[in-house]
Image (spheres, rainbow, N blue to C red):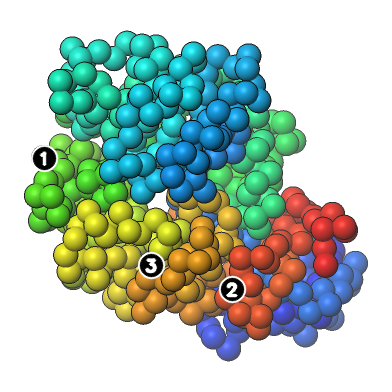
Amino acid sequence: MTRTVFRNGRIFTAATDLARQWTHSLAIEDETVVAIGDAAEARGGEVVDLDGALVLPGFTDAHTHLIMMGQALGQVALTDARTLDDIRELLREARAADPDAVVLRGRGWLFDSVPGGAPTAAMIDAVVSDVPVYLDANDYHSCWVNTAALAELGITRDTPDPLGGAIGRDADGEPNGMLFETAAVQYAWGRRDAATTDAERDEAVERMLDAYSRAGVTGVVDMAFNEHALAAIERAVERHGGRLPVRVSAHWLVENTGDLSRNLAQLDRVVELARRPASPWLRVIGIKLILDGTIDACTAAMGAPYADGSNAEPIWPLRDLAPVVAAADAAGLQIAMHAIGDAASDAALTAIERAIAANGDIPRRHRLEHLEYAAPGTAERMARLGVTASLQPVHADPAIFANWAAMLGDERVDRAFPWPEYERAGALVAFSTDAPTAPHDALANMYVAATRASALDPSVSAVHPQYALPLADAIAHATRDAAASIGDADWRGRLAPGFAADLVVIDTDPFTAGAASLLTARPLMTMVAGRETFAAAREDTP
Ligand SMILES: [Zn+2]
């Protein structure tokens, strides 16, 4: 048996009882915390002097995309590019650095960085035209490609728009290099997935696991799982000796085919996977339905039109949605619904209400993802229905807010990302990053949560600081409540006797040094099930 006593620390337990939120010592036996406080000091074992360092429960990133994140970490990063010239320079450099590559992939560009928010293939062709170029937008709801990519995808003026998406076109009807929503999914990402080898996916998984371990993350919830991702994570479990450095839970992506029986048929595989014996390392727990797009691209389904008078149809209209939600609910699957606009969240909750009416009082733990603009009263309705608010502080980063606000352009902007509303209403709030649509860094995410200032560009001033949360609450939402959102409330997500020894030691204490220190604070050590998954090299530590 391995026994360790951590002493002399500032240990934040994330207990709901405020009197038990902090302690100084923690005893671990094998995979489990067995005592805290003075009781831990009395235990035997190897003693580790924390020397006043801050310890938190390991973070759970409650909404992420594991394979895409790992792939993104290997692509040209465009988020810091503030102008079209910046973007072009990065593409030119990347092409020159790897002249034998047959494709160039980038990610994270912002609509704000492109003239008029209207990217074209010609803008890329001017710097890279000899190979296909695919650039995923920061929100991953659209993809910007060059002319060679359009040719590779076989997209012409005669190609129809897919259900729930659009091929951007110029005034003459020619494809202009933008693929929105399901057009990006089916063409750009479909092509990428078909061209990606298992070896490349394995590399992506290792990059992802390493990045999360370095960030103090010990659990993740994938929000668009599929057969490729399942197989890749299963291979990772094998490579890592029957365990993983990060606990993986997953929601299977179910797509609206427009045909009820084909939609329902997709649930069969998920039910089969969810019934497998529970593993603490990899579990499929439910389904994910993407009800709408994003406000930035005017593809989120709003109750009232955008500033330009347009609006978006939901990808899952209620008539398609309700029977799938009812069937998944009856099967005991957890349902996560991407709902950014208020028309989408309204439809999602109506579908859940109908499922409850049809299926009665059975265990259920459904959730709405993002909720960027929800109508007043939504939080209370969610609390009544026991629906989790799955929120991404990094999506409210003020550096990417101007375009968001301009798209709505009215008093709705005042209600952007109002996290305290969900707390006040009594809904469970689970924080996450939605990587790779935003950086996966847990501490930077906490900075935005606790300040509403920008982690991307600290020179940008805070927007809606009245919606910032106390740091202890923010961390609890990203640890305890994130674990609770997938049904793990009784065994991980906080530091208490009987709970999993999943924790992170941080080199700086933002509770005393101030929230700004979250931007420079670094994990010293991450532990999952009592085993170190990351340790900062001695020379990195101050
Ligand atoms: Zn997502």
User: Residue 410 occupies which quadrant of the picture?
Assistant: bottom left
Dot 3, how many residues are within 10 Å of its Cα: few (below 14), some (14-19), or many (20+)?
many
Q: Does residue 13 lie above or below 67 as drawn?
A: below
Q: Does residue 8 lie above or below 508 as drawn?
A: below
Q: Which residue is mark 1?
A: 319
Q: Which residue is mark 3?
A: 428
Q: Nearer the viewer, mark 1 or mark 2?
A: 2
**Answer yes or no: do the residues labelled 1 and 3 have beta carbons within 8 Å?**
no
Q: How many marks?
A: 3
User: Residue 443 occupies which quadrant of the picture?
Assistant: bottom right
Which residue appears at 33% of the width and 42% of the height? 115
Q: Secondary structure at mark 1?
A: helix
**Answer yes or no: do the residues labelled 1 and 2 have beta carbons within 8 Å?**
no
Q: Which residue is mark 2?
A: 516
Three-letter amino acid code at disc 1? Answer: Arg
Tell me the CA gap for discs 3 and 2.
Answer: 26 Å
Residue 45 falls left or right of residue 529: right
Residue 536: x %, y % from top left: 80, 56
Whether residue 261 appears in this view of the structure is no
The circle on residue 477 is: none
Tell me the CA gap for discs 1 and 3.
Answer: 28 Å
The answer to whether the residue bearing label 2 lies less than 8 angstroms from the nearest atom of ligand 1 is no
Dot 1, how many residues are within 10 Å of its Cα: few (below 14), some (14-19), or many (20+)?
few
Badge 1 or badge 3: first in the primary sequence:
1
Residue that lies at the very extreme toward the bottom in this rendered image: 19
Three-letter amino acid code at disc 3? Answer: Leu
Q: Secondary structure at mark 2?
A: helix
